[in-house]
Amino acid sequence: MGNYSFKTTGLPEPVNGVVEGHNFTQGAPHTAIYAGQTGLTFRRCNLLNCDVPAGSTIEDCLGPVHTSFCSHLYPQWCEKGYITECAENCSHLTVTDIVTIDGVVVDSNYTYTNTRVD
Amino acid sequence: MAGPYYVDPAASGDNNGSDWANAWTNVQSAFDTVAAGEICYLRGTQTFADATTIDVDTRTGLNAAGPIRFIGCNAGGTVDGTRFVINVNSKAVHGLSVTTTADGYWMENIEVKNAGAGGDSKHGIYFTADARGWTLINCCANTCSGSGFHVSSGTYIRFIRCCSYNNTESGFYGNPSGYAIMCSAYGNTVAGFNYSIVTSSYIGCIAHANGTGLISAENGYLLLNSVIDANTSKGIDNIATTGIQMSVIIGNRITNHSGAGDIGLDCNSEPITTGWNYFEANDGDNLQEATLHREIPYWVTGATEAGEGATTNIHDSASITDCGYVNSAGDDFSTDYTSATNPTLRRTAITIPWR
């Protein structure tokens, strides 16, 4: 059982074609893992943002499901290059709260949320 | 006081919770019915067919009447540590959503997994209201797009012998004035234990192979006799805050943070007191001593001043194999070190339930 978040190389070897009990969370949606391998079964894995080989069997996993992560919510991932840096008015922006006093903008508060990707 | 009640998703009787044959097939019915002082037994697996969360928003366990108890059983209905499983089945909801001040639940042998469908993070068990006094024993939250156990609001949540693994965010998040005893957090992308805050306590826990082992956002926590090992970033990261509460970190093993520059214990100039920790194989500083507030001095036989001739944190003992663990590669973080010549090394064995 291992943490292979943000990795597409050095992944654990399947055992009798089964990959079981690992976290393969990726930074970008539709990131391929085990590319070129066939006949795999993924069991009890976290497959967030993963594209597994066509024909793979998925048993009791999270996903594959896909998320566009906002770097404002995960700055540490952005620093390490796992996700792309977002602009201040990125597509993840949901609420903008501008605070003004006597007509002068004194503060800006932004709310961001990750978005689902099909 | 009524009950006991029963939940079994495979039951085919009257679905009224009165016994195993007529058990409720949806645990929501139990959360809507079981009252303070009453007990519900659960067995099997409930798999979500749609994006409908299980809301805990109706009943409260009161101190006078006692907690509301949910206890998982094996297939024969016996309590033996087998967990009742809530499989969110990659739906866009949390597993359990505690959305009101639902106090005083006792959850034993319950597992929640596979929460999320992309987009907003979905957690295994999510406390959004000031629910107080929950006790979770041998519970497990895993493979969620958010955190396993996420205490956004709520206090005095007690985790005993629980585990949380392979979540995209953290194993255990939040939990003011709460504690985790003999819990394990491993394989989580962000952190094992995250947002450690005022009066949180972690005793005899393991944080292994997470992004960061433990992240503290406000200090004032206790970390005692725990293992922080092989996390892919720092072992312990104390984020700069404006709080003045002191954290105490004693008797832990902080090891194998082998990424370039990864620090075992990053104090970041926060008010932290440490002592009797063992550090080994951290690529960066084992301990950011320059920013450490205070090490606990202690007396050595024959010394005339506190701490004379001794160190209170041990760094890199080359004579210790596998950092003192019995078999870390095999997930055995027990320690069997029994040196009579170096009594400063902790010899308390830890046996942690991984799953």
Image (cartoon, coloured by chain):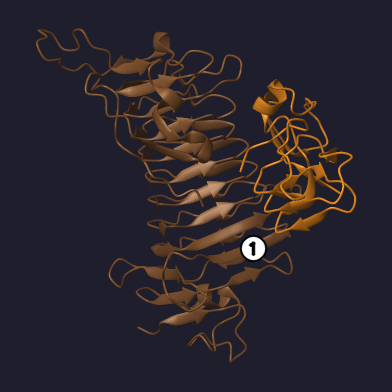
B123 vs B65, nearest the viewer: B123
Above or below, A20 relative to B25: above
Residue drawn at point x = 72 percent, y = 57 percent? B92
User: Which chain, by letter, is orange?
Assistant: A
Looking at the figure, which quarter contains the N terminus of chain A?
top right
Residue B132: x, y in percent? 40, 56
Find residue B61 and report its image quarter: bottom left
Residue B255, relative to residue B207: is it above or below?
A: above
Residue B71 seen: yes
* The colour assigned to chain B within the rendered structure: brown
Residue A33 in picture, x, y percent from top left: 81, 39
In the rendered view, tell whether residue B24 sits above or below residue B312: below
Residue farthest to the front, as pictured: A16
Count residues near mark 1 (Cα–Cα under 10 Å), then give few for <14, some for 14-19, many for 20+.
many
Residue at 48% x, 87% y is B19
| Drawn side of residue B1 relative to residue B94, left or right | left
Taking the image as shown, residue A54 lies to the left or right of residue A46, namely right
The secondary structure type at the circle numbered 1 is strand
Q: Is residue B112 above or below residue B329?
A: below
Q: Residue at x 56, y 34 (%)?
A: B209
Q: Chain of mark 1?
A: B
Q: Which residue: 68% across, 58% down?
A: B93
Which one is nearer the viewer's eye here, B192 or A88?
Answer: B192
Q: Which residue is mark 1?
A: B87
> Can you give x and y, in whole percent of width and height, for residue B196 in the image?
45, 36
Query: Residue type at mark 1?
Result: Asn
